[in-house]
Image (spheres, rainbow, N blue to C red):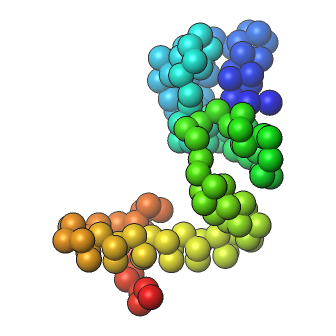
């Protein structure tokens, strides 16, 4: 079931748009767009809805490569992004954290090498420590 179907099901069960929005931490306008327009939800919106209802976001995102990816209700993913997501999901939580730290350090090193201002905090909100990236 994709996120649109999930929202439509909740409305059919009697939930109001404002209740869904509040529970997920998104705007009522976003809920309306999911119900009545062809606007694709962002990954952030999908994660917020899943978290708001205590569900894994993977419920709305195909975990395996194949035809499900073509129907993914977010902006198109490249083959490399699909591969990265598939590999990331195969890791345990500790290794996922390490992988994120490594990617954040690589992105920071790249930004610094391009002359952009370094970011003090990484995506997870903790202080980033620059490691040697080769």
Left/right of residue 46 with respect to residue 119 in the rendered view = right
The part of the image, by quadrant, that contains residue 83 is bottom right
The part of the image, by quadrant, that contains residue 96 is bottom right
Between 73 and 67, the residue placed more toward the observer is 67
Left/right of residue 56 with respect to residue 47 in the rendered view = right
Q: Which residue appears at 37% of the width and 83% of the height?
A: 130
Q: Which residue appears at 26% of the width and 77% of the height?
A: 113
Give the quadrant of the N terminus.
top right
Image location of residue 101, percent across then percent down: 50, 74
Number of marks drawn = 0
Between 79 and 130, the residue placed more toward the observer is 79
Give the quadrant of the C terminus.
bottom left
Q: Which residue appears at 47% of the width and 17% of the height?
A: 29
Image location of residue 85, percent across then percent down: 66, 59
Image location of residue 57, percent across then percent down: 70, 44
Residue 118 visible in image: yes
Residue 127 visible in image: no
Q: Which residue appears at 58% of the width and 74% of the height?
A: 99
Image location of residue 15, percent across then percent down: 69, 14
Left/right of residue 117 with respect to residue 17 in the rendered view = left
Q: Is residue 74 above or below residue 115?
A: above
Q: Is residue 4 above or below residue 96?
A: above
Q: Is residue 17 above or below residue 72?
A: above
The residue furthest front is 79
Left/right of residue 56 with respect to residue 107 in the rendered view = right
């Amino acid at each position: 079931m994709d996120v649109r179907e999930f929202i439509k099901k909740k409305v059919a069960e009697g939930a109001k748009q404002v209740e869904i929005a509040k529970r997920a931490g998104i705007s009522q306008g976003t809920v309306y767009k999911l119900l009545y327009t062809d606007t694709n939800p962002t990954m952030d919106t999908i994660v917020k809805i899943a978290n708001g209802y205590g569900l894994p976001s993977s419920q709305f995102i195909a975990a395996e490569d194949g035809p499900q990816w073509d129907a993914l209700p977010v902006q198109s993913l490249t083959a490399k992004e699909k591969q990265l997501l598939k590999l990331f999901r195969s890791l345990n939580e500790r290794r996922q954290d390490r992988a994120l730290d490594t990617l954040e350090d690589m992105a920071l090193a790249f930004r610094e090498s391009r002359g952009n201002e370094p970011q003090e905090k990484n995506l997870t909100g903790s202080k980033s420590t620059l490691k040697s990236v080769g």
